Image (cartoon, grey):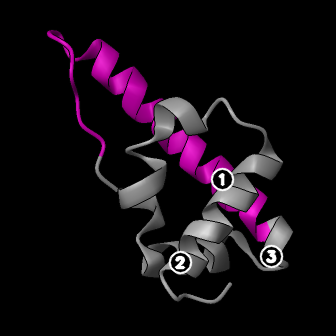
Amino acid sequence: MELKQTAGNGEEGRETGAAKMVFVVFAMHVLSAAWGTSPAGAYAVCKKAGVIDNYLVPHYDVLHSLGSNAIIEDVTGYIRERGVSV
């Protein structure tokens, strides 16, 4: 997972990076509950489909404001579009 620092002294970048990391962990737990697997199992599926680096982190600004059900639907759809089974 790529988390970049963006601000001059690095404080804002670290805060944003930490928030993105927390969001990804939250998403893995939400997805694992919806898919009936462990968070590690959800991570493996998401890693295979490129969800974390190509979807969750780049679109954090929008996705973190959505509810759990919307995240589940969006990520599940993203994964299926890439031919990976949940």
- Overall secondary structure of the magenta stretch? helix
- Residue at 65% over, 60% down: 28
Which mark is on residue 81? 2
Q: CA distance from mark 1 to mark 2?
A: 19 Å
Chain part drawn in magenta: 3-32
Report the residue that reaches farthest toward the top: 9
Please state the horizontal and vertical placement of residue 53, each as a whole percent of the image: 36, 58
> Of the residues under marks 3 and 1, which one precedes in the sequence?
1
For the residue labelled by badge 1, is the local secondary structure a helix, a strand or a loop?
A: helix
Position of residue 34 relative to residue 13, above or below, is below
> Of the residues under marks 1 and 2, which one precedes in the sequence?
1
Amino acid on which disc 1 is placed:
Ala
Position of residue 54 relative to residue 86, above or below, is above
Which mark is on residue 38? none
Determine whether, in the image, residue 65 is placed left or right of residue 18. Answer: right
> Of the residues under marks 2 and 3, which one precedes in the sequence?
3
Residue 11 is drawn in which quadrant? top left
For the residue labelled by badge 2, is the local secondary structure a helix, a strand or a loop?
A: helix
Magenta region includes residue 6: yes
- Count residues near mark 3 (Cα–Cα under 10 Å), then give few for <14, some for 14-19, many for 20+: some
Position of residue 29 relative to residue 37, above or below, is above
Amino acid on which disc 2 is placed:
Glu
Residue 63 is drawn in which quadrant? top right
Discs 1, 2 touching: Cβ within 8 Å:
no
For disc 3, the marked residue is 35
Determine whether, in the image, residue 8 is placed left or right of residue 55. Answer: left
* Quarter of the rendering occupied by the N terminus: bottom left
For disc 1, the marked residue is 27
